[in-house]
Image: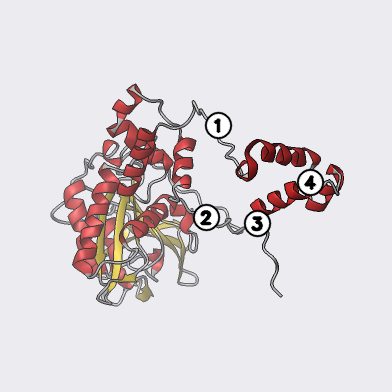
């Protein structure tokens, strides 16, 4: 037998009808219905004043709300939210300040919490699950970014399939200081060739950075000495320093990862029908990210207001490698070996055709240089390479 559903209005009517029979005292009646004596007397008075209609539940909303948000502000907030579905209260309030500033001459400017409440009231927010408790290793000390073009960050966003079932790998390059997005291109795969061509286009427009920060994946790193890949060797030949985050710790490149989350929500949910349509979405996202979307890390300012191109122009030819006269210079063969002191030593296939310098720093210990960077230390007693000293 199903449970009987209780209707509050029916219970109120029963209460006052049984009260009129005079069979129960007010105390007994309230105990039977599970209400307080105060509520019981209120029901009886309401019935006497307005009959059955007087028992209907009344709104507790005040007749006058002087602090209520002006409807014009509510409309403006919802309008900008529809234009930018992924933006939160702070960015929406920034938009109102920039484009609806005349409102504040007529109505009171809302706060961030008020905008957040309006979004919640209109069902435009979702409750995030509680964060998992994860043990994190201490991050290595990475150089701070204090000026444009000091550090660029690069990564491939997780791949996905477009509507025609073809893979899309978005490559993103960003200036760490200004959050300026320099590149957002989708490729069929994260190959060295397409990645280098993308960097050539970016270098031609924006110049060269001092350093590039990446993870340890393809095509940014390789298995040989120093984790070099053909792409990172090319960067070093251009005089660009390498920075790599620790393996398994994407949070060390947190600003870039956060941008990727915004990119995915704005361009790949759902993916476009084909690669060209997807690239149009990437191009639109890049313009909006740089020119329209304020960033909290920049004090709610635009990246385009903080970024300036590098003073280091992209050279047409790679500058030659020059080593001091006291270094032994060896050429890396096509299979990644060098021949030195009548012995063969594997270094890295990524360095094939390049010249390395070897400098004795202690008895039986030699440092292996590539340009101005120490790649490793060679121990002549065991004929093995060891990681470069910190």
Picture quarter containing residue 167?
A: bottom left
197, above or below 67, in the image = below
Q: Is residue 174 left or right of residue 32?
A: left
**Front of the two marks 1 and 3:** 3
Mark 4 highlights which residue?
Answer: 19
Q: How many marks?
A: 4
Residues at badges 3 and 4 in contact (C-beta under 8 Å)?
no
Mark 3 highlights which residue?
Answer: 7
Tell me if mark 3 has few (under 14), some (14-19) or many (20+) residues whose alpha carbon lies within 10 angstroms of its own.
few
In primary-sequence order, the first of circles 1 and 2 is 1
In primary-sequence order, the first of circles 1 and 3 is 3
**Which SS class for mark 4?**
helix
**Which SS class for mark 3?**
loop
State how far apart marks 2 and 4 are (Cα).
50 Å
State how far apart marks 3 and 4 are (Cα).
19 Å
Mark 1 highlights which residue?
Answer: 62
């Amino acid at each position: 037998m199903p449970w009987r559903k209780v209707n509050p209005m029916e219970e109120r009517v029963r209460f006052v009808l049984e009260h009129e029979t005079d069979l129960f005292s007010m105390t007994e009646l309230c105990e039977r219905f599970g209400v307080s004596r105060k509520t019981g007397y209120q029901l009886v008075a309401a019935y006497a004043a307005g009959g059955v209609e007087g028992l209907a539940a009344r709104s507790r909303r005040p007749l006058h709300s002087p602090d209520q948000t002006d409807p014009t502000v509510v409309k403006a907030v919802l309008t900008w939210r529809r234009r930018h579905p992924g933006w939160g209260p702070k960015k929406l309030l920034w938009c109102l300040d920039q484009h609806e500033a005349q409102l504040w001459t007529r109505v009171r400017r809302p706060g961030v919490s008020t905008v957040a409440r309006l979004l919640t009231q209109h069902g435009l927010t979702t409750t995030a699950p509680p964060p998992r408790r994860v043990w994190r290793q201490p991050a290595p000390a990475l150089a701070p970014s204090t000026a444009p073009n000091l550090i660029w960050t690069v990564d491939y966003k997780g791949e996905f399939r477009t509507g025609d079932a073809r893979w899309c790998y978005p490559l993103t390059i960003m200036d760490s200081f200004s959050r300026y997005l320099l590149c957002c291109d989708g490729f069929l795969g994260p190959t060295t060739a397409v990645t280098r061509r993308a960097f050539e286009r970016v270098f031609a427009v924006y110049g060269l950075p001092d350093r590039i920060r990446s993870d340890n994946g393809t095509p940014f790193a390789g298995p040989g000495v120093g984790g070099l890949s053909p792409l990172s060797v090319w960067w070093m030949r251009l005089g660009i320093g390498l920075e790599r985050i620790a393996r398994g710790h994407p949070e060390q490149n947190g600003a870039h990862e956060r941008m990727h989350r915004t990119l995915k929500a704005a361009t790949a949910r759902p993916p476009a029908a084909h690669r060209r349509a997807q690239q149009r979405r990437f191009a639109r996202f890049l313009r909006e990210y740089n020119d329209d979307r304020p960033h909290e890390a920049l004090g709610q300012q635009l990246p385009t207001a903080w970024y300036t191109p590098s003073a280091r122009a992209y050279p047409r030819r790679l500058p030659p490698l020059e080593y001091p006269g006291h270094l032994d210079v060896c050429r890396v063969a096509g299979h990644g070996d060098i021949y030195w002191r009548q012995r063969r030593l594997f270094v890295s296939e990524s360095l094939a055709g390049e010249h390395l310098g070897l400098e004795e720093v202690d008895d039986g210990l030699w440092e292996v240089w590539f340009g101005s960077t120490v790649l490793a230390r060679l121990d002549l007693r065991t004929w093995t390479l060891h990681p470069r000293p910190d």
